[in-house]
Image: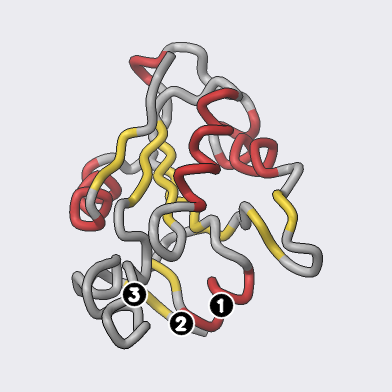
Amino acid sequence: MNAIKSITPKAAFDLIEQEPRAIFVDVRSSMEFLFVGHPKGAINIAWIDEPDWSINPDFVKQVRKLVLGGVHEQDSNDSVPVILICRSGVRSLDAGEILLQAGFSRVYNVLEGFEGALNANHQRSTVGGWRFHGLPWEQC
């Protein structure tokens, strides 16, 4: 069985630049995606979202729709890379495991996530994460 490949934010950005077929999915809640900001080009498919904060039962189906219009390739040598990001790299790891179980073969988890870990003052984006590394992002 395949395993999730954990990569740094910079390596994720490079993979997106080098692999035009790559799908970049931000698995945070819709509110985080909109108001905290998100990587440019990322598509929001929440892993856990309001109002009940339960796991999205359609997550795999929604990701699959992005990959070849819903048809998943069986040849792992030519499958589309799916890159997942969340706030700090935990939810995206859980979501990636479900994608692997569903047959996806090239699943990447962005270490540090979008905001990174908390610092000593309980603030994010100061010790790691997509935004901390100065990678392209936007906010609504």
- Name the residue located 46 percent from the left edge and 59 percent from the top edge: 86
In the image, residue 67 above or below residue 89: above
* Front of the two marks 3 and 1: 3
Tell me the residue that label 1 is attached to: 34
Task: Residue lying at the far right in this picture: please name it.
Answer: 52
Tell me, for residue 139, which label it has, or none: 2
Task: Residue lying at the far front in this picture: please name it.
Answer: 120
Question: Identity of the amino acid at label 2?
Answer: Gln
First-in-chain label (3 vs 1) = 1
Label 3 close to label 1 by CB (< 8 Å): no
Q: Left of 109 or right of it: where is 12?
A: left
- Element type where label 2 sits in the image: loop
Label 2 close to label 3 by CB (< 8 Å): no
Q: Residues within 10 Å of mark 2 (few under 14, many from 20)?
A: few
| Alpha carbon separation for disc pair 3 and 1 | 21 Å
Question: Identity of the amino acid at label 1?
Answer: Leu
Q: Left of 72 or right of it: where is 108?
A: left
Label 2 close to label 1 by CB (< 8 Å): yes
| Alpha carbon separation for disc pair 2 and 3 | 21 Å
First-in-chain label (2 vs 1) = 1
Looking at the rendered structure, the number of numbered marks drawn on it comes to 3
Question: Identity of the amino acid at label 3?
Answer: Leu
Between 138 and 30, the one nearer to me in the picture: 30
- Name the residue located 29 percent from the left edge and 73 percent from the top edge: 131
Between 77 and 1, the one nearer to me in the picture: 1
